């Protein structure tokens, strides 16, 4: 019932409460008129909770009047007398049972008219103009330590005004029937500013300006949550453009530095971090497309270097790890040498095949840190074996029998042909 504002018009509240809780609207109106604060055109959550606490026996744990207590509660308030104004001094009147004091002029019907002051102890003060018993035009209202200065119509905030809350929150802008409506800005107690065109207490699209002057521009949910399409410009020069759900990025483009537009990530996000499938474009000219986890290249992906060399395979923690293929580009834009095999921390490591594009020769065997290291064999372009043996750091160490190579099971899966 209080979705976006601290208080709502009484008529709206009675209609909503009566419908949701199956309670006669007349009973709710009667309760408000005889029990709550002097401005009976509006009700806030604080007032209603105080009332529920005072008559707790009649309510369930959800604040709904118990069905078997509706008649009893109705009788209490139908019996509660409402006295007209009692003059206690010149142009000063008191109303019962509320105890409200009015300083000003009453017409023949007992309605407040013209300039006046309405107060109750230290919990409510209104100073301004009245017409037919209701506040109009310019006025100032202090209620439960909230202060409003601005326009009124029929007892409601209506027009332009400034509303200050005791926790430091401030709204400045347009109101319509007591709700933020039209152009306005809400300064939250944490220093974050929400600016935009409000609609009946809600801000569905606008600008959020943070304490460090970075800002969000786009769609919103329940005022405070980035939801839908929007852009964040960060103070350090980075920028995000894309889609949000419940204040978290889900898909879009993050520019690491707007001065270097070739440096970005475009793809999926989880909890504000690149994760899923995406593309990294680097200032060096390199490009990665594939799986991403915790902001890093992880899973299967393709990396094309600035010189057009290409890696296709698996990644862990931004490093080539596991099975993959590395293609070296020749000057004529055709791929030359090819490595197909195992990787570790970006190096040829484990078992693999290396084909020389120009000669057609190939090495099949074990590797360590990009070098032939362990058992292997060299095969010529015609398929004949040229050498079988054991290598140490690219150097042939000793010859061995082919039966003793000890290649891993399923090693054939690493074998490729040129241009494959």
Image (cartoon, rainbow, N blue to C red):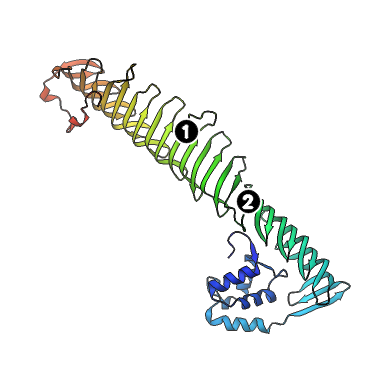
As drawn, the residue found furthest toward the right would be 90
- Give the crowd class for mark 1: few <14, some 14-19, many >=20 residues within 10 Å: many
Mark 2 and mark 1 lie on one chain; the one further toward the N terminus is: 2
Q: Is there a contact, CB below 8 Å, between mark 2 and mark 1?
A: no
In terms of image quadrants, where is residue 180?
bottom right
* Up-down relation of residue 391 to residue 149 (above or below): above
Q: Position of residue 84 (x, y in %)?
A: 78, 79
Tell me, for residue 81, which label it has, or none. Answer: none
User: Which SS class for mark 1?
Assistant: strand
Which quarter of the rendered picture does the C terminus lie within? top left
* Up-down relation of residue 284 to residue 250 (above or below): above
Tell me, for residue 197, which label it has, or none. Answer: 2
Which residue is at 40% across, 29% downward?
Answer: 287
Relative placement, left or right, of 327 versus 184 is left
Q: What is the C-alpha distance between the residues marked 2 and 1?
A: 32 Å
Q: Position of residue 224 (x, y in %)?
A: 57, 51
Q: Is residue 168 visible?
A: no
Q: Nearer the viewer, mark 2 or mark 1?
A: 2
Q: Nearer the viewer, residue 46 or 415?
A: 415
Q: Nearer the viewer, residue 406 or 357?
A: 357
User: Which SS class for mark 2?
Assistant: strand
Which quarter of the rendered picture does the N terminus lie within? bottom right
What residue is pinned by disc 1?
A: 264
Q: Is residue 370 visible?
A: yes
């Amino acid at each position: 019932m209080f979705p976006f504002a601290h208080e709502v018009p009484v008529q709206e509240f009675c209609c909503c409460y009566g419908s949701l809780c199956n309670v006669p609207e007349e009973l709710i109106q009667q309760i408000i008129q005889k029990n709550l604060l002097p401005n009976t055109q509006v009700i806030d959550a604080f007032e209603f909770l105080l009332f529920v606490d005072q008559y707790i026996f009649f309510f369930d744990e959800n604040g709904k009047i118990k069905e078997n207590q509706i008649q009893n509660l109705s009788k209490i308030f139908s019996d509660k007398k409402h006295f007209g104004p009692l003059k206690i001094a010149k142009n000063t009147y008191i109303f019962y049972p509320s105890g409200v004091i009015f300083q000003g002029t009453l017409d023949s019907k007992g309605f407040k008219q013209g300039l006046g002051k309405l107060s109750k102890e230290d919990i409510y003060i209104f100073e301004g103009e009245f017409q037919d018993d209701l506040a109009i035009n310019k006025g100032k209202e202090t209620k439960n330590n909230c202060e409003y200065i601005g326009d009124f119509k029929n007892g409601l905030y209506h027009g332009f005004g400034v509303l200050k809350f005791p926790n430091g929150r401030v709204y400045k802008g347009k109101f319509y029937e007591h709700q933020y409506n039209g152009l306005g800005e809400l300064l939250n107690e944490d220093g974050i500013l929400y600016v935009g065109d409000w609609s009946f207490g809600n801000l569905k699209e606008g600008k959020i300006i943070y304490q460090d002057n970075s800002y969000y521009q786009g769609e919103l949910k329940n005022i405070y949550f980035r939801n839908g399409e929007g852009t964040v410009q960060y103070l350090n020069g980075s920028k995000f453009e894309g889609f949000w759900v419940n204040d978290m990025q889900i898909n879009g483009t993050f520019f690491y530095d707007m001065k270097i537009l070739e440096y970005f990530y475009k793809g999926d996000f989880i909890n504000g971090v690149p994760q899923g499938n995406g593309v990294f474009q680097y200032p060096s000219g390199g490009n990665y497309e594939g799986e991403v986890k915790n902001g890093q290249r992880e899973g299967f992906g393709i990396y094309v270097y600035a010189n057009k060399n290409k890696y296709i395979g698996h990644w862990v923690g931004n490093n080539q790890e596991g099975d993959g293929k590395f293609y070296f580009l020749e000057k004529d834009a055709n791929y030359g040498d090819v490595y197909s095999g195992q990787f570790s921390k970006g190096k040829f490591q484990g078992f693999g095949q290396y084909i020389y594009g120009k000669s057609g020769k190939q090495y099949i065997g074990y590797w360590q840190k990009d070098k032939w290291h362990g058992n292997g064999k060299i095969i010529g372009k015609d398929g004949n074996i040229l050498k079988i043996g054991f290598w140490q750091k690219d150097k042939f160490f000793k010859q061995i029998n082919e039966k003793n190579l000890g290649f891993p099971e399923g090693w054939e899966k690493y074998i490729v042909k040129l241009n494959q």
